[in-house]
Amino acid sequence: MITAERKPIEEIMEYVKPYKKILLLGCNECVTVCYAGGRKEVGILASALSMAFLKQGQKVEIDELTLERQCDPEYVEELARTIEQYEAVCSMACGCGVQTIAGRYKDKPVYPMVNTKFMGASERQGVWAERCQGCGDCVLAFTGGICPVARCSKRIFNGPCGGSSGGKCEINAEVDCAWQLIWDRLKALGRTDLYEKIMPAKDWRAARDGGPRKIVREDLLA
Ligand code: SF4
Ligand code: SF4
């Protein structure tokens, strides 16, 4: 899932201070799971903003709404009848949601309320860790299901580097060396033959580094 964290209230106040009526818009998907921008967080931010405005002696109307998915035009269309009454939309979705709203309602200011972090997985309650960088050409089949792009600090494809020590990465003693994890996993699977194969230089054109990407599924086109 995509992980995010709410922006500091001071930054949010800077964005919204010119407005007297705003829509605080949550999203029911990833940002709900990581407790950054779901219905509950919309309520918490609405209260925090109301108090902050009150302290400044300002009266601002804040409405709350949570869409099923802000990155899906079908749900974003639900705003068509009501969005006109707001001076600005404060989106608590990830950057994809913010841009979908901004793209559909071109004359409406849309502000991000969260910082989108990474594609990750939950390690335990309250802890998420990066697991994929969307490189566009997944190699997990050869690395025991552990990603060398997201989890190796140098994105090495034939690791480990000389900085690996005691199973930890040289950048930080608390960070596991991804290639140690890959080795351990391949050993457990009885597939160390995969480790012995030299992986070819990666073609980064399929990755974000090759420009904005799109998926077009011909079979799903109307
Ligand atoms: S190899 Fe690429 S697609 Fe696969 S998990 Fe890593 S970054 Fe994601
Ligand atoms: S120590 Fe391991 S994780 Fe860190 S950069 Fe080297 S190979 Fe990658």
Image (cartoon, rainbow, N blue to C red):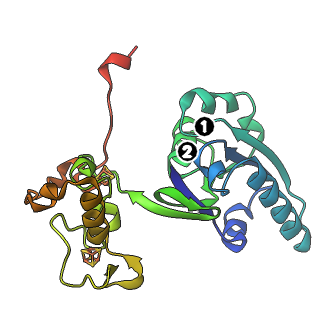
Closest to the observer: 6 or 211? 6
Q: Quadrant of residue 217?
A: top left
Instruction: Tell me which residue sits at (90%, 73%) in the image.
Output: 55
Quick check: 12 left or right of 152?
A: right
Q: Position of residue 150 (x, y in %)?
A: 34, 62
Measured in 3D between alpha carbons, the distance from the residue under mark 2 to the one under mark 1, in whole angstroms, is 8 Å
Mark 2 falls on what kind of element? helix
Quick check: 92 left or right of 181?
A: right
Q: Position of residue 213 (x, y in %)?
A: 31, 43
Q: Which mark is residue 60?
A: none
Packing grade of label 2 (10 A; few <14, some 14-19, many >=20) is many
In the figure, 214 relative to 211: above or below? above
Closest to the observer: 193 or 160? 193
Per the image, the residue denoted by label 2 is: 97
Q: Quadrant of residue 71?
A: top right
**CB-based contact (under 8 Å), mark 2 and mark 1:** yes
Please identify the quadrant where the C terminus is shown: top left
Q: Position of residue 79 (x, y in %)?
A: 69, 32
Q: Position of residue 98 (x, y in %)?
A: 56, 48
Quick check: 40 left or right of 76?
A: right
Amino acid type, label 2: Gly
- For the question of whether residue 13 can be seen, the reply is yes
Instruction: Tell me which residue sits at (82%, 46%) in the image.
Output: 63
Amino acid type, label 1: Arg
- For the question of whether residue 115 can be seen, the reply is no
Instruction: Tell me which residue sits at (88%, 67%) in the image.
Output: 51
Packing grade of label 1 (10 A; few <14, some 14-19, many >=20) is some
In the figure, 111 relative to 105: above or below? below
Mark 1 falls on what kind of element? loop
Per the image, the residue denoted by label 1 is: 69
